[in-house]
Amino acid sequence: MSKQAQFLSDNAASVHPAVWDAMRAADDADAPYDGDAQSAALNEKFGALFGRECEVLWVATGTAANCLALASMVQPHGAVVCHEEAHIEMDEGGAPGFYLHGAKLLLADGKSAKLTPGDIRAVIDPIRDDVHQVQPHAISITQASEYGCVYQPEDIAAIAGLAKERGLALHMDGARFANAAAFLDRPAGEVAGDVDALSFGFVKNGGMTAEAIVFFDSQMADVARYRRKRAGHLQSKGRYLAAQLHAMLDGDIWLNNARAANAAAQEVAGACAERLMHPVQANELFVRCTAQEREALRAQDFAFYDWGDDAARFVTAWNTQEADARALSAAISGL
Amino acid sequence: MSKQAQFLSDNAASVHPAVWDAMRAADDADAPYDGDAQSAALNEKFGALFGRECEVLWVATGTAANCLALASMVQPHGAVVCHEEAHIEMDEGGAPGFYLHGAKLLLADGKSAKLTPGDIRAVIDPIRDDVHQVQPHAISITQASEYGCVYQPEDIAAIAGLAKERGLALHMDGARFANAAAFLDRPAGEVAGDVDALSFGFVKNGGMTAEAIVFFDSQMADVARYRRKRAGHLQSKGRYLAAQLHAMLDGDIWLNNARAANAAAQEVAGACAERLMHPVQANELFVRCTAQEREALRAQDFAFYDWGDDAARFVTAWNTQEADARALSAAISGL
Amino acid sequence: MSKQAQFLSDNAASVHPAVWDAMRAADDADAPYDGDAQSAALNEKFGALFGRECEVLWVATGTAANCLALASMVQPHGAVVCHEEAHIEMDEGGAPGFYLHGAKLLLADGKSAKLTPGDIRAVIDPIRDDVHQVQPHAISITQASEYGCVYQPEDIAAIAGLAKERGLALHMDGARFANAAAFLDRPAGEVAGDVDALSFGFVKNGGMTAEAIVFFDSQMADVARYRRKRAGHLQSKGRYLAAQLHAMLDGDIWLNNARAANAAAQEVAGACAERLMHPVQANELFVRCTAQEREALRAQDFAFYDWGDDAARFVTAWNTQEADARALSAAISGL
Amino acid sequence: MSKQAQFLSDNAASVHPAVWDAMRAADDADAPYDGDAQSAALNEKFGALFGRECEVLWVATGTAANCLALASMVQPHGAVVCHEEAHIEMDEGGAPGFYLHGAKLLLADGKSAKLTPGDIRAVIDPIRDDVHQVQPHAISITQASEYGCVYQPEDIAAIAGLAKERGLALHMDGARFANAAAFLDRPAGEVAGDVDALSFGFVKNGGMTAEAIVFFDSQMADVARYRRKRAGHLQSKGRYLAAQLHAMLDGDIWLNNARAANAAAQEVAGACAERLMHPVQANELFVRCTAQEREALRAQDFAFYDWGDDAARFVTAWNTQEADARALSAAISGL
C-alpha cells in the first residue's frame, strides 16, 4: 500500500506516460490555436471511434465542455432539463448561467442521479407553453452519473426519443464517459447513443488539460467554435491539447485506464455489500459508514471525502494501485 | 538558418525545457484546482517580484486573463477605455462583451497603439454624466503595445493619475510584459506601475498553457476567483499551470527569454531602418515592404504575416535562432 | 351582479379615476425621462410614507421592478434565495436570469409561499463556501405572498436579521404590498420592515402602467438608475408614470383600494371555510373544489382560474363590486 | 407665440387627443398582457399599412423596440453594423450590450448619419472570417436618421441587397419613421423597404407610452415575444398600449402629426439657409450659430439644445404651434 492511499477523487491523478510522450512530441512549433495538424485530425479519429461523423473541439475543463455544448443548443431565454444533482447544477460555480446568458436549469429528480423519460416529463409537462414560463430547449444527462451509475443504450434511446418528440436537443456530460464505456463493454457510439453533443472527459482518466466536446450536429459545432474563442478557451498552443486526445484514443488508453479504475472500484465494492448507496458501475463508491468508522479508515491512511453525515465517497483512478484497493477493501471489511 | 525561419508569431513557439521539467515534477497527485502547494505559493513569489503584495490566479489564455481582470473592475453597465487596436477589441472574439456582460469598449486612438492621458480624455471627456451614455469604469493599456512599443514608468504614472482622478480602475494587458521589462531593464514593479491588475503573459515566452493574472487589489481578486470558476477556467490539475509559472520566474527565465526575443528583433531591426513603421522595443517588427518584396522573402523560406497591403509583421520568439535573425536581416537588407 | 363577474386576476382591472385625472393633468410638456417635476418629487413623498429616506424609480412592470432591484444587489456570479413558487421563479419568463446576468435563484420551501429564517437556512447552510458553488447575495420575499398571505413585522425582522448576519441584501416583492398593508393596518414602514429595496405595486391596485422601486439603500439606487435605462425602461414621457404614483399616494388611494379588494375577498372567504387552502389575508382565495363544482360556478358566469385539478383561484380587485362578491359567496355556499 | 417656445425635443410632447380617447375607451377590463382584443388586432392593421404580413409587438420605449428587434437577429457572439452616431450606440445606455448579451456594435461612418452600402462594406470587409474577430449578423439603419435625413426607397433597397448578399439581417430604427414617410410621401411599405424588423415610433409623434416593433419575419417575432416578457416589457394592461397604436393608425394621425412637425421644421429651415449642417427632411434642424447667437435666441424664450460649440439643435413636434415656428424663423433671420 502507498504511504497514503488516495481515494479523494480522480480529478487530480497523475498524467499517463503516453500522454506525456505525445505532448513532448508536439513540441515543435505548428500553426497556433486549432490550426495545427493534430487538432485537424481530431474529427476523423473521433468519427471512427463513434462510427459517425462528428466535429471535435478541445477545451481545458469539463465545465467549459458542458457549457459550450449547452450554449450551442439553448437560447438565452430557454432552459436545460438536468438532474438536481448534476455537475452543471451543483459544482460549476454558475457557469451554465454565464455561458447560456441566463438560461435556466430545470431540475429533475431521478434514482442514482440518472433520469428517465418519466423524470423529465414530470418537470416539463407542467410548464405552460407561454412566455411567462421558461421553456426547455435541451436535456442534459450524465454518463456515468454523479453517483457512478450508467445508462444502458436503451435508457438513452428512450430519452433521445422524448427529446426528439419535444423538439429538445440532447447533451451528455461524459466526464466519466470512459468508465461508462468500460462498464457497458459496448462501442462508444452505443454508450453515447443519439445525443447531439458529448462532453468527453479525459482529464480524470489520465489526461492533463484536455477534454473533448464531440458534436454530432454540425451547426452546433459552428456556434461552439465562436463561443470557445469568446470564452477565452481557444488556447494558442492547442497542439498540446490535441496531442493529449490523440494519445488517449491511440491504443485505447482511454478505455484501458477506465477499466483499471472500474476494477479497483469493484475490488473495494466487494467489501461494501449492504453499505452501498448506489450500485458500483464506474469508479465511484458511496458507502454508508459512521463518523467513527470513517475516522478508523483515516487512521489507516485512507484519504476520501465524507458524503453527508453517514457516508463516505471513494473514487478510484486509472492509476489506483491494486494494493491500495485491496487494502481499502480489507479495511472496510474489518470495520 | 532553419529549414523555414518562423517569424509568424511567438504564440506557438516551443515550451522552454525548464517548464517541461517543472511540469514533470508536478506529476504526483496534489490537491485539485488551486489547492495544491505550487498554486498556494504564487502570491508570495510574484509579490517578491513586484515588490508589493498581490494575489495571483493562473488561467490558460491571455483572453481569459484580460477579461477576468476587467470583469472584476467593470460593472455590466460600464465601459473600458482601450486603444482601438487593442487585443481585447480586435482579437478576442468578443470575449470582453461576454465576460463583462455587455459592458462596452470605448476606443481611443494613440500612437503606436499606446495611449496618453490626452488620448483617454479625448474619449471620456465628451461623455455626458447621465444614464443615457455608458460611463467608463476602467482603462486598459497594453505593455508592450500591439505594435511592440513600451510605456515608460512615467507614462504609466500619468495614466494611473488620470485613472485615480476619474475613479477608474487600471488594467494592463501584459501578453508581452516580459519583453517590455527586458527593454526597460527596470524592476517588474516599475514596468507595471500602479495598475490594479496585470495580465502577465507566459505562453508567448516559453510557457505552455499558463498565464497569470496579478491582482494588486484584493477585492478584485476575490471577484475573479469566482468568475474564473464560472468561466470554466479553474482547471482541476492546476498544479501543472502553477508549475509553469514557478519555472518561468525561477532563475529569471521569463526575463532571459524576453531578452533573447528582443535581441533577435533588434538584429532584424538593424536592417530595416526607414522601413520601420514603429520603433522596435520588444519582439515585433512592422516593416514597410511591397508585395513583391514579401514574395522575395518568402521565396527565401521566411514565414511571416502581411500587415495590410504595404507591410509585413515579423515576430521573434524566445527560441528564435540567431542564425535565422541574421539571415532575415540580410535578406531585408538585400531587398 | 355584473354580466360576468371577473375573479381571474387583479392585473387587468380598470384604472382608478384619480389616476386618469392625474395623468391628464400631466399632459403639458415637461422635461423628458425622469427630469420632470413629478418624478423629482417622488423621493420625498415615498419617504414620508415610509418614515425614512428613500429613492424611488418608476418602471412599467413588476417584473422590471423586481429584477432591477435584484440586479442592484446581486453580482452575476451570485444568487438570490426565494420561495420556490415566487413570481420571479415561476412567472417572469426568466427575467431574473437576464437582468442578473445569469445569477441563480436558490429555491426555498415555505408554508403559503412565505419564508422563515429556517426555510432560508435550509437552502443556504449546505452551500460550501467555495468557488464551485454559487453563493447567495440576497434574499427576496413577497409581501403579500403568492398565496395571499402576509408577513407580520416580526417575521420580516427575523429574516432581515438573518440577512444582516450573513451579509445578504433583502428585497421585497410588493406586487400586492398595498393588500398586505391593508391587512396589517400598520404604517407602510412596518409593513416593509428593514428591506433594502421594495417593488411597490400599483398596477394591480388601480394604476395603469407604473410601479415603484423604493430603494432604502442609496448605492443600490445609483446602480438601478443606469440599469433602468439600459433595460429600455426609462420612458421619455415619464411624467405620466410619476403622475400615477402621486395619484395613488395622495388621499391614500393605494390603501383604500386595497382595503376594498381585501374586503371583497373576505366576503367570499366567509363562504369557503374548510375549502380554503391558505388563510385569506389579502385579495386572493385558493379554494378546494371539484371540476364539477367549478363548472357549476362558471355556468353562473363567474370567471376565475383553475388551480391544479382540485382547486380554483379567485382574485378580487379594487373595483370588484360588492354584489359580485356576495353573489360568488352565495354560489360557493350553494355548491 | 407660446410663453416659452419649446424646440428641445419631440420626446416629451403632449399626447394627441385621439390617443387619450382610445385609452379611455380601453378602460374596461380585457384579458391581460397581449391577450386583449386590441393587441390581437395589431398584426392585421399594420399588415394593411405595410402591404405585407407582419407581426407587431408593443413596447414602452424605442430603446426596448430597437434592442428586442436586434436580439431576435443577432447571436451573442455576433455584431450589428450601425452608424457611429446611431441612437443604439450613443443614447441607449448600453442597452444593446444588455439585450444582445454582449454582442458588439460595429460603427460605420456616413454622411448625415445615414449609411450607404459602401459605408457598410468599409466596416465589414476588413473583418477576417475567423473566430478571433466578431462577425456581423445584422445591419441597423435609422429612418429618418439622427440628423433628420431620409433614406430614399432605392437607398434602402441597396442596403437590403448587401444584407442579403452577406447573410445579414436588416433592422430599421424608425423612432421618426412617420417623419420620413411624411417627407417621402410614399406608402409605408416603401418607406420601410425590405427590412426584417422595424422599430416604429409613436411616442415622439403624439403617443404616450407605446412603440411598435413590426416584424416581417415570423421567426424573429417568435423570439422577441419571449424576450419581451423576459425584459419586463410585457405590461399586464397592454390594452392601453395597443389602444394607442390603433388610435395613431386610425385616420392616419401618425402621418398627419408627422406632416405637421415636418412643416414646422420647414418653416424654420427657411430662415437658416447656409447655417444648416444637414438638409432638413424631417423635424430636426442642426443650425450653425455662435454661443452669442444662441444666447440671443434663448433671451427671446426659445428653448433648444446646444449641438457642440458652434451649433444648435431644434426639434419640432406634432403640436408645435405655427406661431412658434414662425417666431423662431424670424428670430434666426434676425440674428
Image (cartoon, coloured by chain):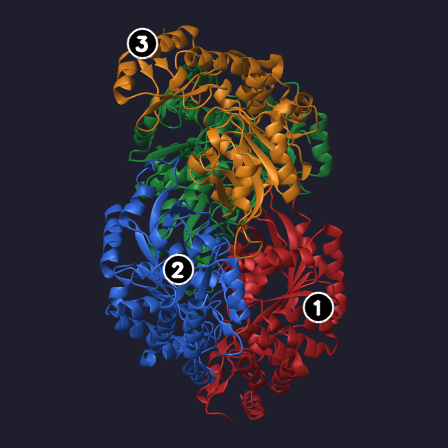
Chain colours: A blue, B red, C orange, D green
Q: Position of residue C35 (x, y in %)?
A: 64, 29
Q: Residue C196, can we see it?
A: no
| Residue at 50 percent of width and 23 percent of height | C203
Residue linked to disc 1: B192
As drawn, the label of residue C334 is 3
Frontmost of labels 2 and 3 is: 2
- Give the answer, above or below, for where B197 lies relative to D189: below
Query: Depth check: B242 or A303 in front?
Result: A303
Badge 3 density bin: few <14, some 14–19, many ≥20, Cα 10 Å = few
**Amino acid on which the number 3 mark rests in the picture:** Gly
Describe the element under mark 1 as helix, strand or loop.
helix
Badge 1 density bin: few <14, some 14–19, many ≥20, Cα 10 Å = many
Judge left or right: residue D228 versus residue B164. left
Mark 1 falls within which chain?
B
Q: Mark 2 vs mark 3: tell me if same chain.
A: no
Q: Mark 1 vs mark 2: tell me if same chain.
A: no
Q: Position of residue D76 (x, y in %)?
A: 44, 52
Q: Position of residue B305 (x, y in %)?
A: 49, 77
Which quadrant of the view contains residue B110? Answer: bottom right
Describe the element under mark 3 as helix, strand or loop.
loop
Q: Residue D42, can we see it?
A: yes
